[in-house]
Amino acid sequence: MKRRTFIHQSGQIVAGASLLYLGACANAADNKTTKTTVNETEMPQELFFKISLAQWSLHRTLRNGQLQNLDFAATARNDFGIEGIEYVNQFFKDKAKDMEYLAEMKKRAEDNGVESLLIMVDGEGNLGEMDDAKRKISVENHFKWVDAAHFLGCHSIRVNAGGAGTMPEVAKAAAQSLGEISDYASKAGLNVIVENHGGYSSNGEWLAGVMKAVGKPNCGTLPDFGNFCIQKEADKCIEEYDRYKGVTELMPFAKAVSAKSHDFGENGQEIHTDYAKMLKIVKDAGYSGFIGIEYEGSGLSEVEGIKATKALLESAGKMIG
């Protein structure tokens, strides 16, 4: 056989074999059955939402000094493969106006390809305060966190709607406070969002009513899967609102969502909350933003609890489609 003929025929054989191989791969892909496990690598394109990490999930690690606030962004990305973060003001409480510190926080997030989403604000006074002078101080205390969130590139600050009084009284005061903070935040293009966070706010119907009373487009909610204890005694919940009803009532106003977790069974499911049921409620409401991991359990370490919650969000999310 001549060399030219041999090369030509060899090329045809190789090309034919390649086509057969590609065809086999295509058939295998067509016939493949997708299996979801809690250990499956995250495939964001298959989920209707993105996953973020609430800083509170690492509150013990932060408080004992094993993790610094400035390292939170890198930890979220490098340890958990998470691209969105939710700060808690308790971990940089005296830095709201420290522009050098905030600039470093912003740089750390950008360097790690992480999006700063919101600041959860606590300890700045009750927005449902009956005393009008005290209520105004509480309102003004939140302005600096609006400014800090805007500088960091966040879309929202999360606030609380607590207060001492009757349900209608606290609702009226909270709505007035939220309206005033929302007006201030609107100048920076920020949202003011309220979490179901104990007391009246854990009553979904009550908080939805407050949202309607405020009636501003940049005032909304942060539905949390697990914060529906209305009344406690000796750290034990004695009155709890139905969590699925509550999330359903709050989702029309949602600008963020919190996936609270405490305890997991051997099958990787959270034993207090049906995540598939919750995620269907979230999806049916038309939400497609970030859902934040907020692990608060003690059965697993904070690191393992975050990983278990992330795996559950991925598997349940893919099941919902």
Image (tube, rainbow, N blue to C red):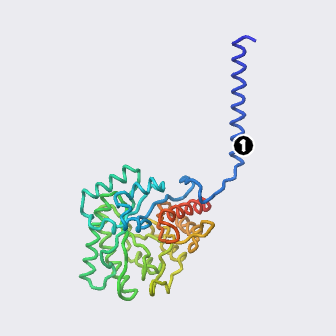
Q: Quick one: 82 or 150, which is closer to the camera?
A: 82
Q: Residue 226, position in %: x, y?
A: 50, 74
In this view, 84 is above or below 160: above
Which image quarter holds the N terminus?
Answer: top right
The three-letter amino acid code for the residue at tag 1 is Asn
Q: Can residue 25 be seen from the camera position used here? A: yes
Q: Secondary structure at mark 1?
A: helix
Q: Residue at x 37, y 67 (%)?
A: 64
In this view, 218 is above or below 40: below
Q: Residue 222, position in %: x, y?
A: 44, 69
Q: Residue at x 63, y 66 (%)?
A: 267
User: Based on the displayed image, in which of its 4 quarters is residue 16 positioned?
Assistant: top right
Q: Can residue 321 be seen from the camera position used here? A: no
Residue lying farthest to the top in this orientation: 2
Q: Quick one: 201 or 254, which is closer to the camera?
A: 201
Q: Is residue 175 left or right of residue 316?
A: left
Q: Which residue is mark 1?
A: 27
Residue lying farthest to the right in this orientation: 1
User: Based on the displayed image, in which of its 4 quarters is residue 24 positioned?
Assistant: top right
Which image quarter holds the C terminus?
Answer: bottom right
Q: Residue 279, position in %: x, y?
A: 56, 66
Q: Residue at x 34, y 70 (%)?
A: 121
Q: Residues within 10 Å of mark 1 (few under 14, many from 20)?
A: few
Q: Residue 8, position in %: x, y?
A: 70, 18
User: Based on the displayed image, in which of its 4 quarters is residue 58 positioned?
Assistant: bottom left
Q: Quick one: 134 or 214, which is closer to the camera?
A: 134
The mark tally for this picture is: 1
